[in-house]
Image (cartoon, rainbow, N blue to C red):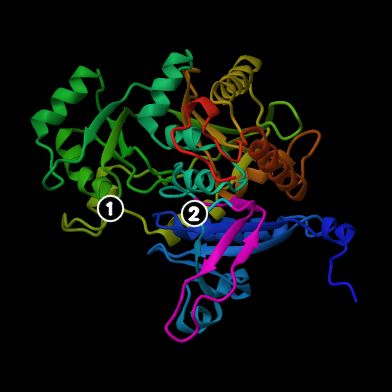
Amino acid sequence: MSHIKNPQAQNTQRPRVAVIFGGRSPEHDVSVVTGLQVMQAVDSARYEAFPVYIDPKGAWFTGDVLRKRENYLLNPVALAQARNVTLDVNISGKGRLVPVSTPFIGRGRAVEFDIALPAFHGLYGEDGNIQGLFELAGIPYTGMRTLACALLMDKAATKRILQALDIPTLPHAILSRPKVGTLIPKDKIATVLREKNIGFPCIVKPSHLGSSIGVAKAANEEEIAACLPAVFEYDDTAIVEPFVQNLVEYNVAVSRIRGRTEISAIERPKTTDELLDFKQKYLAGGGGKKTGGVKNPGQISQGMLSLTRELNPDLDPPRQDNIRSWAHRLFEALDGTGAPRIDFIGDSKTGELWLNEVNPCPGSFGYFLWEALDNPFLFTEFLSALLEEAVAEKRRKILPADPVPRDARLFPRAV
């Protein structure tokens, strides 16, 4: 009897997709929600998706127990059913998750996959770190590339890019975490703001996070100084911007998922009271006693999930054209991949509009923005397009087996 596998049968095997989520981020919990949603939406006729969970301490796990939301965060029972693994960064043509060895079991068999589908939000996942790891290991992955992720998760760097592209963005000032402690003198804050011509009220927020964690409104230098410890708990840099009166927000996603750069439907998040000023955020509870100034990730998750929005709002043609053209210009300038969500803010009375920030991996991948198009792009179809793009990007950037040119080789090669 022949032991050679049927080549035709091998070719019909579905590519394995590792949906990777969680991570060492303040946005860990909402990343879990996004990862589970994505895993359910992947086309099971074309792909075999399985979960890879990274816990808040950075440990990697896989196993069917991770498919159910009720098992998070992993309790001892669920943890016993998951396999602790680590990513093999040796280039082998496939992604490989190597089980972490234990004294009694040893390593066990590696788990192989064909494409990584990262569903991270914030630090160490949306900011280019995990993307660089996939590049190092030669693994196809969905979403924006390493450089674009790193630039767009830095709000100050994003603003410099926007200025170079002649796209309006609010002025800003940068306050860096001191080498010792978290306090910055009020006179130094006043000097920095004066140099950047930023008055009061203003908005203070972390420069490298992707949600409302640490965001506050301040009326003077003293309130900014009091906000900074909460920002510096999660980030080494705070960014200060003018407060926009009569605030209105617009979000749009961009992708090359149909072979050309396309813009999703526009959404207008409905007005909420989530943006708290200093007194609400830091002096709540009476008696002037400071309470925690940072929402916990669970609260953030629920807020995002319950957010109400208006899709395809009635906009005057110039404003709609600006949103679409500025988003398109930025995406093309970054040689964009994936489907980032680009967020705008404006003054509803003056008509002013600014590009505010970019989410390389928006919550739930922003699928509802694509489903709201006149020619809808459903979530499953959308994910298949991202997976196809991941493979194409890997093929586009492939290197020779020996990347050292012959004329640059200083040592003999084995025959």
The image's mark for residue 362 is none
**Disc 1 residue type?**
Gly
Q: Which residues are magenta?
A: 92-120
Q: Position of residue 346 (x, y in %)?
A: 48, 25
Kind of residue indicated by mark 2: Gly
The numbered mark at residue 293 is 1
Q: Tag 1, which secondary structure? A: loop
Give the quadrant of the N terminus: bottom right
Instruction: Judge whether 20 appears above or below 100 on screen.
Output: above
Mark 2 → mark 1, Cα distance in angstroms: 16 Å
| Residue 233 at least partly seen | yes
Label 2 sits on residue: 303
Q: For this rendering, which residue is in front, 57 or 267?
A: 57
In the image, is 332 to the left or to the right of 13? left
Disc 2 secondary structure class: helix
The residue at 59%/68% (across/down) is 110
At 78% across and 58% down in the image, what residue appears?
Answer: 14
In the rendering, at what x and y percent does residue 19 appear? 61, 57
Whole-percent x, y for residue 146 in the image: 49, 38
Q: Quadrant of residue 164?
A: top left
Q: Which quadrant: the C terminus?
A: top right
Please say whether residue 245 is visible from this viewpoint.
Answer: no
